Image (spheres, helix red, strand yellow):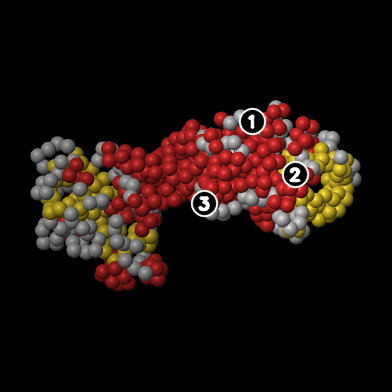
Amino acid sequence: MFLALREIRFSKTRYVLIVAIMLMVSFLVLFVTGLANGLGNATSSAIRNMPADHFIVQQDSDDRFARSELHAEQVKQAQAIAGTEGAQPLGVRMTTVTREGTEGRIDIALFGVQAESWLVPETVEGQPLSTAAAGEVLADLDLKKSGVKIGDTMVDGATGLKWTVGGFTENRSYSHMPAVWMNEKDWAAYRSELMAARGGETDTAYNAIALRISNAQADQLRNAVPDADVISQSQAISAIPGHKAEQSSLLMMIVFLYVISAFVLAVFFYVITIQKTAQFGILKAIGAKTRYLAGSVIAQVLVLSVGSLAVGVGLVLIMKSMLPAAMPFSLGAGTIALSCGLFLGVALLGGLASVVKVAKTDALDAIGRAGA
Amino acid sequence: MNHRIAAAVQAKPAAVQTKLNLSGVSHTYGDGESVLTVLDNLSCSVAAGELVAVVGPSGSGKSTFLSIAGALLTPTRGEVSIGGRSLAGMNERQLADLRLHEIGFIFQGANLLPYLKAEEQLRFVARLGRADKAQAARRADELLERLGLSERRKHYPDKLSGGERQRVAVARALMNDPSVILADEPTASLDADRGRDVTRLLAERVKAEGKAGIIVTHDERILSYCDRVLRLEAGRLREE
Ligand SMILES: Nc1ncnc2c1ncn2[C@@H]1O[C@H](COP(=O)(O)OP(=O)(O)OP(=O)(O)O)[C@@H](O)[C@H]1O
Ligand SMILES: [Mg+2]
């Protein structure tokens, strides 16, 4: 540290410049990570925050809830193995509603569940979902931003059915739409209305079955339920329309940013290490050990990256507080810590070339040379 | 030269103590067809309080000799002992430790770290040697004072004159209280007066602190400060 800090103090400009670059890169890393998380939540939080570990979907539905149709028979078969508690039928349907008395359309994702089951999210405002209260739904807080209040009535565009918002839950969106949860009676009414409007047969089927089971039970279910697939929660999430495309392009950006920061640091430190070969030779000649000198290089890498990370995290947090609420951005302390750890690891990797160079420097260079 | 004996006696009243000893040292560069024998069965010993100059034509092996005496290069044959300890069988780490504690180097140029102030240059080698902080500070003060650098202690090397820089290098070489001081053309980049100044101070310190000093030099004008002048020729040292 003695050498590391004094050298930074002496060559301020040089190190300020590299910190500035690192700062921008780390800021971008954190920002894009926050964006990826935010978008991920907007597409999948309704499923991600469900305490289910597996789902049953129709075969050949590409694991998509919206494409999958399950019959009451299949639900019974699943419950025979997983128990009534372990297998909960789940209806998912995207639709468009208007608030009664207004014109504006709102896209929502309807979730039909058995009220009072573990699938129903916690209520943060108003009344929880109940079997008794017909036509009363639990909506994601995002709906509030569209002007919907507790007690408001929403009219479904396709069926003309009316639902009253009884309470709000939070962090439940699906494919960028706020999720609206209704009990099984309302769901059944909605389905039959929908089928009647289409002229098809009435059918109270669900789209999927949410499971809380062991892996052994999952295998059992695969064999027992015909024409159905048992998929994991993460499979269900990545099948949500748009989720995979968004996440993979953002992930690629993040990976590139890490690679860039590793390279920038590697080149920077390698170049100054080469410039200082004569100095390292002299230091070794007067008895400094390679470990000490390598430690000094590593200490510099750490000081610079920790410094730029600290400022980068500060900037991102300021930015976060100024972002409009509608912007999908989510960056928790855990994610920040993980990103910072990764960034430090990558920075150290970048410093490695210089450490090798230092190790290779020969103390003999010090003698018989005018030096620089 | 009488002050040599006086200094030696002052350092170790009992007897003249040999601080550096090379015996039967040979060194060859290259292998197979093109072997170059630079040192050939060379022997030399330097006592405490003695400053020896080594001169010789370019390419005669002065730097090679100094590297071997400074535990930077292991000779092809022969034995080196520093401060009474033989270097035979020591590994890299042990050699580095020995250089740190027993040898003070003064190089021709690029001697000092550009980003350390004069007094930090000294404190740094003390830190490397894990010396007590307060004691190191006192030692650094004293050395800077003796070498006339008290006013310059807070200056970076680029704000020091060439002569001042080399004096800081002398102080740094003495900092860890080594047995041996080795200087490789320390006055090459200085004018005559500065060169003489630095050498005079170096000689003074070597005698006062009972070190064994070797200066490799081309500079005839500083030879008068040395107790002995050895000429390196045909791989051996010959007294002038
Ligand atoms: N690493 C090496 N490999 C091969 N030959 C070398 C090596 N180092 C030095 N030599 C050769 O050994 C001889 C002695 O070199 P050395 O550097 O010791 O000379 P010197 O007396 O210090 O010369 P100068 O006064 O020019 O500094 C030279 O001929 C040189 O070319
Ligand atoms: Mg030489």
Sooner in the amino-acid sequence: mark 3 or mark 1: 3
Name the residue at 79% across, 53% down.
B21
Residue B42 on image: x %, y % = 86, 49
| Contact, mark 3 vs mark 1 (Cβ under 8 Å) | no
Marks 3 and 1 sit apart, C-alpha to C-alpha, by 29 Å
Residue at numbered disc 1: B162
Residue at numbered disc 3: B133
**Looking at the image, which is closer to me, A195 or B164?**
B164
- In the figure, is residue A339 to the left or right of A268? left
Sooner in the amino-acid sequence: mark 1 or mark 2: 2
Dot 2 alpha-carbon crowd within 10 angstroms: few under 14, some 14 to 19, many 20 or more? few
Foreground label between 2 and 3: 2
Q: Label 1 amino acid?
A: Gly
**Image quadrant where residue A71 sits:** bottom left
Sooner in the amino-acid sequence: mark 2 or mark 3: 2
Residue at numbered disc 2: B3
The dot on residue B60 is: none
- In the figure, is residue A149 to the left or right of B70? left
Marks 1 and 2 sit apart, C-alpha to C-alpha, by 29 Å
